[in-house]
Image (spheres, helix red, strand yellow):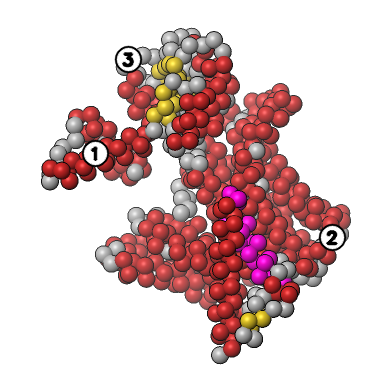
Amino acid sequence: MVLEISLLFHLGIILIAATIFNFIARLFKQPPLLAYLAAGLFVGPFGLGGLGLSFGGIPVGVITTQEILILSELGVAFLLFSVGVESDLSKFKELGKIAILGTILQVILTALIVLGANSILNVLSFEQAVYVGLIVAFSSTAIVVKILSDTREVNTLHGRLMIGFLLMQDILVIIALPFLTNLQRLFSPLLVTGLVLEIIMLLALAYLLNRHIYPKLFEFASRSDELFFLSAMSSVFIFLFAAYLLGFPMAMGAFVAGVSISTLTYNIEVAHRLRGVRDFLATIFFVTLGIQITPSFLGFPLGLALLLALLVFALKPLVFYAITLLSGYGNRVSLTVAMALAQVSEFGFIIASIGKPILDQTQGLYSFLLLLIAVSMALTPYFMAYTDSIYNFIVSHFSGAVERVRKQSFLYRRINALGHVPEKLSGHIAIFGGGTVGANIAEALSGHAKVVVVDSDPVVVSGFTKKGINAFYGSVDNTEAWQKAGVDKARLIVIAVPSTKPALALIRKIKKGDQKQKVFARAHYFHDALAIYEAGADAVIMPHVIGSNIFVKKILEYLEKGKLEEFSEGYRDLFTFYLWEKSREERRSLL
């Protein structure tokens, strides 16, 4: 009875501490992950656990009992299930070789750097070096995709590249996990063959459920909120049990479970219904990580700690930068990708847990790796924020050498030849951003004036070219794109990209000189609109505000008159007909 109350008490301590530290993190605008890590440190051996306090005979400090570790492992499982549900493997079709070959090369190079450094320093065993190399090689899908979604950069070229790298990394780590439970399997062809067959069995189960069971099951279950929730939960545990029977980590089963649902029309709803369970268990997981960061990491060799930090925050981004640059994607895109992927994946926690008995053979190694993983994930937003400063430094000191390397690549020649721009531009309209907003503007104005569209998505550029609209590949904050688009001689500048920060550079450039061009820009938030106006824009449009005003107007009309009047012709063009005239697949992609 005391044991049961102790578990409940410590679970409550974990949640209360997580809540308090999350409040503090919100006040100081810090990532929640950092708050959970700090909460774990506070209730663990570093904090309350080291004071020896008790409440009703129960120690206040939390230790990682077997029961809490099981809940923590479930947190990882549901976290990776969500990653699997939101994974879109079709991205590989768009990115081709760089997503597959580039990721394999990056993982191998990063692991080899660790093994090579260890062979020189001779401070870790071969098994420990393998675990460390794999831990630092992978980047966090959950963190990066969340940031890209928040900044609405998922469909940019650098966003697509990041997601391609991350999805391929997820596949590689899922393949590697079964081998890590027993490294001897790597040297036994018979064991490798058996393991491959087991993986095929798990994937076959996912395929059968995806093709023949899940569509009808979730269609029927969608009629009841309770049944839909239970069906989604059951789908996770089916694969957890299957992974356990096959000897795989639960996290691998959960990820495959998510992928098996990712292609269904109900995938987003499944992720939404399980978000509460995922957040609850994931909070326990991250706080537990903080608890496991014991004072033993203070005994870890400082030189080795600095070397591992250098590998994660400098050498690994350098590998990503070199691979992306040599593929021809340009200095800015390559640097953006490199800085965004300068962290360790959530899979690193799983790899570290699997290899804990081996890592613990060196004092403080396991605890230090947990700290390094958590801190690297928490620092990702700051790394991405300083990309522009680092880019300006590289351009001012090494732009010539970098440009020569880039122009040697086949992809540079292909992208540079993509699209069409007249040699002499004057009195035209330059539109930066060819998404939904920019495309509508370009199509509407193309019959009245010469239009040039600049977009950072090669697929979008190809679409404009096929329609006979001048377009080329580039970004709104790229000075080369400004020249190519003839900004100085344009009659009007339209900035239709959703990101405010890169748009400000172009607006200030135009308004700083003697040019008299009018600048129309879009904004998502009111404070962004104010910043754009202060930079010198002549008109700022907020599409979602206009849409919501029309929405409210139609609702009020219905409440006053008791009936719903038809949209006017202009509104129908904007909303009803625009979607209705599209094919079913196009409507789904737009929505």
Q: Quadrant of the N terminus?
A: bottom right
Q: Position of residue 334 (x, y in %)?
A: 62, 36
Instruction: Point out the tag, 1 or 2, that comes first from the N-terminus.
Output: 2
Give the image quarter of residue 220: bottom left
> Which is more toward the observer, 391 or 45?
45
Q: Quadrant of the C terminus?
A: top left
Q: Position of residue 560 (x, y in %)?
A: 15, 43
Q: Which residue is mark 2?
A: 301
Image height of 552 relative to 404, above or below: below
Q: Furthest residue to the bottom?
A: 1
Q: Which residue is mark 1?
A: 553
- Tags 1 and 3 touching, CB below 8 Å: no
Q: Position of residue 162 (x, y in %)?
A: 56, 44
Q: The residue under label 1 is which amino acid type?
A: Lys
Give the image quarter of residue 250: bottom right
Q: What distance separates the C-alpha of mark 1 from that of mark 2?
A: 66 Å
Residue range of the region highlighted in magenta in the rendering? 28-45
Can residue 281 be seen here? Answer: yes
| Circle 1 Cα neighbour tier, 10 Å, few/some/many (<14 / 14–19 / ≥20) | few
Q: Which residue is mark 3?
A: 448
Image height of 480 relative to 436, above or below: above
Q: The residue under label 2 is which amino acid type?
A: Pro
Give the image quarter of residue 328: top right
Image height of 53 relative to 497, above or below: below
Q: The residue under label 3 is which amino acid type?
A: His
